[in-house]
Amino acid sequence: MLAFLGRRLIAAMIVMVAFSFVVFFLVQLPPGDFADVWAASRAAQGDTVTPDEVENIREAFGLNRPFVVQYADWMFSLLQGDLGFSFEFQKPVAHVLAERLPLTLAISFAALVIIYLVGVPLGIYSAVRQHKMVDYSATFIGYFGLATPNFLLALILVYLAQRWFGLSAGGIFSPEYLGQPWSWGKFWDMLSHLVIPVLVLGSAGTAAQVRTMRATMLDELSKPYVRAALATGKSPWQVILKYPTRVAIIPIVSTLGWELTLVISGAPIVGIVLSLPDMGPVFLQSLIGQDMALAGVILLIYYLLVVIGTLISDLLLFWLDPRIRMGVESK
Amino acid sequence: MDPIIDISGLTLALDKSRSLPSLVDRLSLSIGPGETLGLVGESGSGKSLTSLAIMGLLPKAIGATAGSILFRSERAGAVDLVRLNDRRMRKLRGREIGMIFQEPMSAFSLVHKVGEQVAEPLVLHHGLSRKAAVAEAAHLLDRVGVREAGRAVERYPFEFSGGMLQRAMIARAVACTPRLIIADEPTTALDVTVQAQVLDLLAEVQREVGAAMLFITHDLAVASKVADRLAVLKNGRLVEEGPTRQTLNAPRHDYTKALIAALPRRASQTVAPASEADILTISDLSVSYRESSGFSRRRALKKVLSDVSLAIRRGTVTALVGESGSGKTTLARAALGLIRSTGQVTMVAADGSRFDVGTLTGKGLRAYWRRAQMVFQNPYASLNPWQTIEETLVEPQLQHGLASTAKARDTAVEMLERCGLEAGMMKRFPHAFSGGQRQRIAIARALVVGPELLFCDEPLSSLDVSSQARIIALLKSLRRDLNLSVLLITHDLAVTSALCSDVAVMREGQIIEYGPSDEIFDRPRDPYTRRLIAAAPKLELT
C-alpha cells in the first residue's frame, strides 16, 4: 500500500514537471509578448511608444532571453516559493491568488460535493425504480441539466432568485454588507449568494453522474449475485447498497480526477456572468494580456488539482476493488 | 411423514397478459424430509421459475396466478409461500430455505470477501457479530472441504477455483441448517471430477442437516445419481413423476423417453480409412506465460503447454479432453496461430499446400485461417448481437475475398440450411434464437469460408441434452459430407464417446494418453484417464 502510494506520488511529481513545461510553452505560444501588449494598450490611449521603450521593457522583464532560460528561471523561482509578479494587475501573483483562490476553490468543491451527494444516490434510486416516476423525472431533469449551457442557467437562476427571494444579482455580498466588517449576517449573506454558482456549476456534472450511475447500476442489478444475496434473507435495499453499489460506483470513482477539471474550467464563464470575484475573470484577463507569471501559475494550480484528483481516485479504487489492489500488489 | 414442501396447482404467468400461455402450469410437487426430488427438463421448461417462486424471488413481471406452495416452517408453522408477505418471507430465506445457484463465479460478488458473503445468513438470522459470523463461516468452509478455511475467508471469489467456490456457495446455503435446500444446476459449470465431488458433498450435507432437497438439472445422468424421485417438466407442465429408477427404466411419457434417447451414447466407430494422411501435425508444442499466481503473489514463468505432440487424421473427429485449466483451449489457440508458441504445427491442405503455422504472418495466416476455423464455447457471446445472421455469415467470406456479396449470400444460405436452419432466418438477429440454434449459426459461420479443419471449443457445454444431441448429429454429418476434420475440445466424456474416433487426454499442459476412442474407453492405461471415466455421470439404471 505504502509502496503504491510512493510510486504514485513520484509519478505525480514527474507529471507536474512535464505539465509545467507545457504550460509555459502554451502561454508563450501566441505571437507577441507582454511588451507588445503593453505597447498596444499605451498606443490605444494615444501615447506614442518608441521601439526603444518596448525593448527596455523586454530587457527589464527578461522577455528577450531564450525560451529555455526563461522557463528554467520561472521554475527555479516557483520552487523557492516565489510565484512572480503580475504585470497585468501590477502586484505579486501571490496577492492576486490570495484574493481570488479561496472563493474559487470553495465554489468548485461545493459543486463537486453536490455532484456526488445528489448524483450517486439519485442514480441508484433511478436504477432501482426503473421506469417509475422518480426515474423519469431524474432523466428529464438530467437532460435539461446536460443540455442547458451553464451561463444561461446562471442568468435564469439570478433572475428567479431576485424575483422570488429578493437576492441581489451577482457578486457575493448584498450591497448593504459591502465594506462592512465580518459578521454572522454577512457570512449568511455570502452563503446565500454562493448557492446559485454552486448549483450552476454542479448541474451538468450531477446530471452526468446520475446517467452513469443509473446505467452501471442497471447492469449490476441484473447479475446473479444480487439474487443470490437476496436468497440469504437480506432486505432488497440492504443488498443493493452493499453489493451492486460497490461495483457500480467504480466508473464514477475512476473519473473523479477529471470531474474536478470540468467544474473548474466551467467556473470562469459562470464567474463572469455572475460577476463573482473568483479566478475566472482574472484568468481570462491574464491570458489576453499574456501575463505569463499569473496565467502560468493559475494553469499549474488547475493541473495540480487534476493530478491530486486522479491520485485520490486511484486510492479509492485501490480500496474499493480488490482486483485492482491485487493487480497492483503482485507487480 | 408430512412433506416439508407441498406445491399444488402452482401456475406462474406474466402479470399483464393472462392471454399468453402460463410459464408454469398447474404444477404439483411435494418433497419430504431427507428426500431429494430431481426436477429435470430443458431450458425454458420452467424449472428455475419454480425454484424462484419458492424463494419469493420471481422477476417483477411474473407472478403466481393460481395454486399454493405450502411450506412447513420450523418457527412459523405451515405457511403458504405464495401469499406470505415480504418481511416474513425474508425470515425464511437463507434460514429455513437455502439456495445454491448455477454459476458460482457470478453468484458471488467479486469485490467482497468470501467469508463475509458466506457469513451473511448467520449475521442476519442468528444475530452473530460480524467477527463471530466470519469465524463460523471458516468452520463451515472447512466442513465443505475448502482447504485452509481460516485464510480462505479472507480471500476474494476470483482467487478461488470454480469447484471451491461452489463449495463455499453450499456452505452459505446451509449455514443456518435449512429445512429445504434448492440446488439450481449446481454442477453444470464444473468439470466432471469436480462435479462428482460436489454432488457427493451435497448429498452428505443434506443428510447431516436432514433437509429436503429440490435438485434442478437438465442432465438426466446427474439426476439419476442424486435424486430419490424425478419430476419431468416440459413447457411448464409436469409430464411425469416417480421414483428415479422406475422413471428412467420404464418412462411412461414420450417426452421422458425422448430425453433419455437424446443422451449421448457411445457409437461404434466407423473409422476413416487409415491410409488417409494427417491433416494437422503438432510436435513438441509449448506455450508459457509470465504470470502472477493468486495466492503466492510471485511472478513465475508458467508453462501452460509442454511438448505436446498430436496428429489429426483427415476426415476424423479427434477429442481433446481434460479438466479446465489443463491447456486444451491454449492448444487450439496455438495451433491456430493466435498465440506465440514454440514447436511445430503443420497443416497440409487437400490441394497439397503446406502451412507451417509458427512461421506464418499476415497474409500467410489469413490463407491458413481460410482452411482452419474455430467454433467457440458460448454461442451467446460469440455472435455479434448487432449483426443479422446474414451479415454474420457474409462478412467472413468478404473478409477473405472469396466471393461477391451476392454469391456470398448464396453460400450463407446453403451453409445455414446444411446446419439445419432456414433461409428465412437470415434477416434476424442472434437474440431471436435459442442456444442450440445459435451454436448452429456459429458453426455455419465457421463453414462459409470452406475450411477443411475445424476447432470446436466446448461447443456443447452450454446447451441442454436435446440441443446437444442435434449438434452431435450435425457434426457427424458435416464430417461425412464435407470430409471435415475436427478437433473437439470437451470435458464431457459421454459426448466424446458418441462422436470421436480418436481421443487425447490432457492434464496440466501435457497429453497423458492418446489413441483410438475405443481403446481409451475400454482399456484406459493412465490412472487419471480411469478416474476421469469413473467420475463422468452415467445414467444409473439398476
Image (tube, coloured by chain):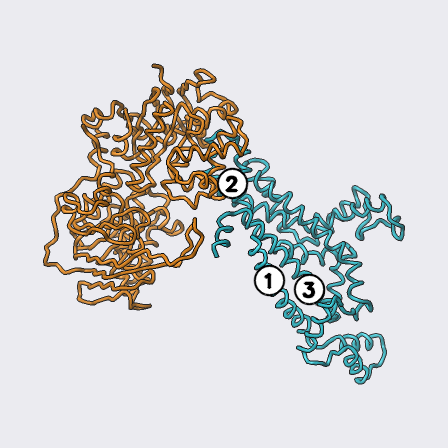
Query: Badge 2: how crowded within 10 Å, few (<14), some, or many (20+)?
Result: many
**Which residue is drawn at the image coordinates 66% and 60% (left, top)?**
A304
Q: Report which residue position mark 2 lands on.
A: A244
SS under mark 2: helix
Q: Chain of mark 2?
A: A
Question: How far across and down, in percent of the image, does residue A295 sit?
Answer: 72, 67
Tell which circle, 1 or 2, labels the residue nearer the N-terminal end.
1
Q: Colour of chain A?
A: cyan
Q: Give the colour in which the image draws chain B.
A: orange
Quadrant where the C terminus of chain B lies?
Answer: top left
Q: Position of residue B159 (x, y in %)?
A: 43, 46
Task: Give me the residue at 30% from left, 53% from top.
Answer: B327
**Mark 1 Cα within 10 Å, few/some/many (few <14, many 20+)?**
few
Residue A70, picture quadrant:
bottom right
Tell me, yes or no, whether dots 1 and 2 are on the same chain.
Answer: yes
Q: Residue B38 falls in which quadrant of the image?
A: top left
Residue at numbered disc 1: A10
- Label 3, on which residue? A299
- Between marks 3 and 1 in the image, the one whose residue lies nearer the viewer: 1
